[in-house]
Image (cartoon, rainbow, N blue to C red):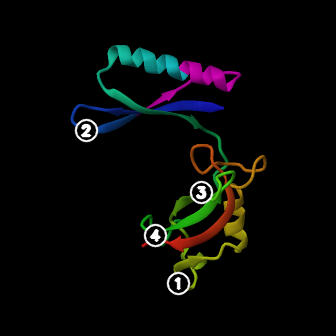
Amino acid sequence: MPDYVSVTLLDGFGRETRKLVELTPQLTLGGYVDNANAWLSAYAEIGDLQIVRANLVLEGLDLPETDPAGSNVDIGATFTCFIGDGAGKKASLKIPGIKMSLIGAGGFVDLEDEDVAAFLDLYGDPPDNKVRLSDGEWAESWIQGTLDK
């Protein structure tokens, strides 16, 4: 369950700041949402910064060990897919820090690579998908993956 609400606030000069607010344990997700909303409403009464975003944050996730040596946030890939039930509509998924070992000739990513396919399957057909592209959309089929310029 969520442990915190992360709140992004904006001042009159266009500068953002973030506030992490710890939430008391609840039995349901709705309880966490209610408590986060209560904090946001109470802050709006005493603060003059604009609340531009509030996200529930989960703690206790199993983070796999990785070594960032040699990685670069400027190197990424874009995957293109047909959206499920989208009548031929396409969507793009950008992934920062793609491993260069996954980039082949012409800057293309092999969609058949075991690790790439497993990652992209997370966005696939319901009900087995684990995450969504955006706006609740899911990927019906992947077209290509390319190294960003």
Residue in the image at 67% along x and 68% along y? 116
Q: Nearer the viewer, residue 81 or 70?
A: 81
Mark toward the start of the polypeptide (1 vs 2):
2
Q: Which mark is residue 14?
A: 2
Q: Which residue is mark 3?
A: 89
User: SS for tag 3?
Assistant: loop
> Any magenta on residue 39?
no
Q: Could you tell me how far apart the alpha carbons at marks 1 and 4 are, in whole angstroms?
A: 15 Å
Packing grade of label 1 (10 A; few <14, some 14-19, many >=20) is few
Q: Which residue is mark 1?
A: 106
Can the viewer see residue 140 in this picture? yes
Mark toward the start of the polypeptide (4 vs 3):
4
Residue in the image at 27% along x and 32% along y? 11
Q: Could you tell me how far apart the alpha carbons at marks 4 and 2 are, in whole angstroms?
A: 28 Å
Q: Is residue 27 above or below residue 147?
A: above
Q: Could you tell me how far apart the alpha carbons at marks 3 and 2 are, in whole angstroms?
A: 35 Å
Residue in the image at 60% along x and 24% along y? 32
Closest to the camera, between mark 3 and mark 2, is 3
Closest to the camera, between mark 4 and mark 3, is 3
- Name the amino acid, label 4: Ile
Mark toward the start of the polypeptide (1 vs 4):
4
- Name the amino acid, label 2: Gly
- Name the amino acid, label 1: Gly
Can the viewer see residue 25 in this picture? no
Closest to the camera, between mark 1 and mark 3, is 3
Q: Which residue is mark 4?
A: 75
Residue 62: give x, y in percent of width and height.
67, 48
Packing grade of label 2 (10 A; few <14, some 14-19, many >=20) is few
Residue in the image at 33% along x and 27% along y? 50
